Image (cartoon, rainbow, N blue to C red):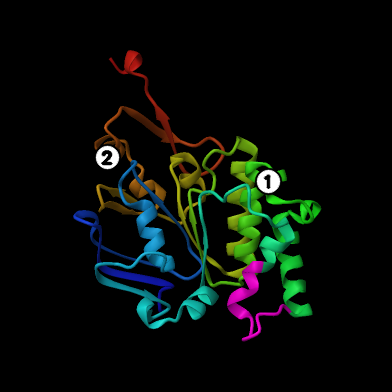
Amino acid sequence: MIPAIDIRGLNLSYGKRTILHDVSFSVREGEFFIVIGPNGSGKSSLVKAISGAVRAGTGGIEIFGRPLRDHSRKALARLVAAVPQTQPADVPFTAAEVVLMGRSPHLGLLGVESAEDVRIAEAAMSFTGVTAFGLRKLDRLSTGERQRVLIARAVCQQPRVIVLDEPTASLDLAHQINIMELMEKLRKQNGTTVVMVSHDLNLAAMYADRLLLLKEGRIVSLGSPTEVLTYQVLEETYGCVLLVDDNPVKAAPRITLVPSAVSS
């Protein structure tokens, strides 16, 4: 089976600084794939490269068997939807208008939405639970509500792959679990491939089919949460003392930071 994403020997630099070094991996269609690692490890740059937001220096990225560079911007947007970490709160549009923007890759030359486009946008809003505040401007929404609107816009694109850059950052616990459940629902009901960057190792452990652990732009480990989230690997990668045991509510590792006063 052709993977949804296939990356071979990817190198990415900003000026003289190399961000990603010879990165190679693939993501299966319908997989929940989460990228983890310390700050500055290249996680955000990697998902930006997958979505076409930044151009790789050398190496190749294929989306469903076709080189990313061979896709037009509009064709790529029909396949891959990107959800940024934040959205400016002063965008002068309502939530419903922002969601409907997700139909732009599917519109004709005149760029006019049809009744079917509106129906799809409404369905995306219902799916993500944002219908109730569809007529409110983004600056009237909480951080969690804005993030769900961005996800609704991505769902409205009807992509085969959705990439998210730390979608749970700065959210409270209830909104964090809501976002993760939305992604799991999208994957199970629509067969959408989900690629996410996360700093939360415990959320990643509970939801990911596979994890990619990066450090300083290089792959440290790739595999299931049980394979990747060992205390030896994590302590070496993050440079702190950690306890890894079994999550009491789900078959997954649980990671606990150990304060220096305790570890000593």
Tell me what residue is drawn at x 64 percent, y 46 percent: 178
Q: What amino acid is found at the position of numbered circle 1 in the picture?
A: Asp
The answer to which quarter of the image holds residue 242 is top left
Q: Nearer the viewer, residue 84 or 59?
A: 84
| Region rendered in magenta | 101-113
Placement of 262 over or under 35, stated as above or below: above
Most foreground residue, 119 or 259: 119
The answer to whether residue 102 is visible is yes
Q: Which residue is mark 2?
A: 237
Within-10-Å neighbours for mark 1: few <14, some 14–19, many 20+ = some
247 versus 156 height, above or below = above
Locate residue 186: give its quadrant.
bottom right
* Residue 108 lies in the magenta-colored region: yes
Q: Secondary structure at mark 2?
A: helix
Which of the numbered marks, if any, corresponds to residue 139?
1
* N-term-proximal mark, 1 vs 2: 1
1 vs 2, front mark: 1
Circle 1 SS class: helix
Pick whichever, 176 or 228, lies toward us: 176
Work out whether residue 212 can be spotted.
Answer: no
Direction from residue 93 to residue 10 in the image, left or right = left
Residue 150 horizontal/vertical position (percent): 61, 56
